[in-house]
Image (cartoon, helix red, strand yellow):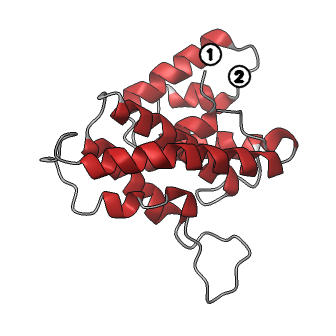
């Protein structure tokens, strides 16, 4: 079962509807004994409340968790691997993949990673995927975007290696579950 942070990252970098979150909350309640009150609040939340509730739950797991934290970036990378794999299995469209790539690119651009003030952080584990998605729209199909498939096949391994190396650097409870 996904944790609060995984659900929140999917909300930030993909499309997740309120019903999905409520189903997750019901499942969480059924399968756990120690249930934070925010999980119950998700059941009655509207589309303007669920993100703040999920962020509060996520911060309770990892006080340093934020939209640009390394923990969130690892989860975003893992989510992209899942979406890319679905694309390679013809389960999602090029637009689905490119929407996630674009949101991740924008979400982590300039993240605080201890770089000099004149250097902006870029998630280099994205490789060439942002360029592969350039001009992507709803008319793209797997057959009309062979470059995207090729770049995804190459990049999935690189993203996995990046996740592995950065996951090892996290300590204690902040460590993200393996792929």
Specify few, some or many for label 2: CA neighbours under 10 Å numbering under 14, 14-19, or 20 or more: few
Residue 49 in sight here: no
Q: Quadrant of the N terminus?
A: top right
Q: Are marks 2 and 1 in contact (CB under 8 Å)?
A: yes
Q: Position of residue 48 (x, y in %)?
A: 42, 46
User: Residue 87: which numbered mark, if any?
Assistant: none
- Please state if 103 lies on the left or on the right of 146 as rendered: right
- Residue furthest to the right: 172
The residue identified by callout 1 is 29
Total number of numbered labels? Answer: 2
Above or below, 78 against 2 in this view is below
Upstream in the sequence, badge 2 or badge 1? 1
Q: Quadrant of the C terminus?
A: top right
Q: Position of residue 22 (x, y in %)?
A: 46, 24
In depth, the one of 169 and 62 nearer the eye is 169
Q: SS at mark 1?
A: helix
Q: Residue at x 38, y 31 (%)?
A: 86
In depth, the one of 117 and 4 nearer the eye is 117
What whole-number distance in Å separates the C-alpha atoms at marks 2 and 1? 7 Å
The residue identified by callout 2 is 35
Above or below, 149 against 124 in this view is above
In depth, the one of 43 and 118 nearer the eye is 118
- Residue furthest to the bottom: 118
Q: Residue at x 36, y 47 (%)?
A: 150
Residue 86 in sight here: yes
Q: Position of residue 56 (x, y in %)?
A: 65, 45
């Amino acid at each position: 079962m996904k944790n609060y942070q995984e659900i929140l990252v999917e909300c930030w970098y993909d499309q997740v509807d309120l019903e999905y979150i409520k189903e997750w909350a019901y499942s969480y309640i059924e399968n756990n004994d120690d249930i934070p009150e925010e999980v119950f609040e998700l059941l009655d939340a509207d589309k303007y409340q669920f993100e703040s509730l999920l962020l509060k739950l996520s911060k309770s797991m990892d006080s340093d968790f934020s939209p640009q934290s390394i923990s969130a970036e690892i989860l975003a990378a893992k989510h992209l691997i899942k979406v890319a794999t679905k694309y390679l299995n013809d389960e999602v469209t090029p637009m689905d993949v490119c929407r996630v790539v674009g949101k991740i690119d924008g979400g982590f651009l300039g993240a605080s990673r201890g770089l000099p003030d004149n250097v902006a952080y870029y998630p280099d584990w994205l490789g060439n995927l942002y360029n592969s998605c350039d001009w992507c729209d709803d008319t793209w199909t797997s057959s009309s975007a062979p470059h995207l498939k090729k770049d995804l096949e190459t990049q999935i391994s690189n993203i996995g290696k990046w996740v592995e190396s950065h996951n090892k650097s996290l300590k204690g409870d902040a460590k993200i579950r393996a792929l």
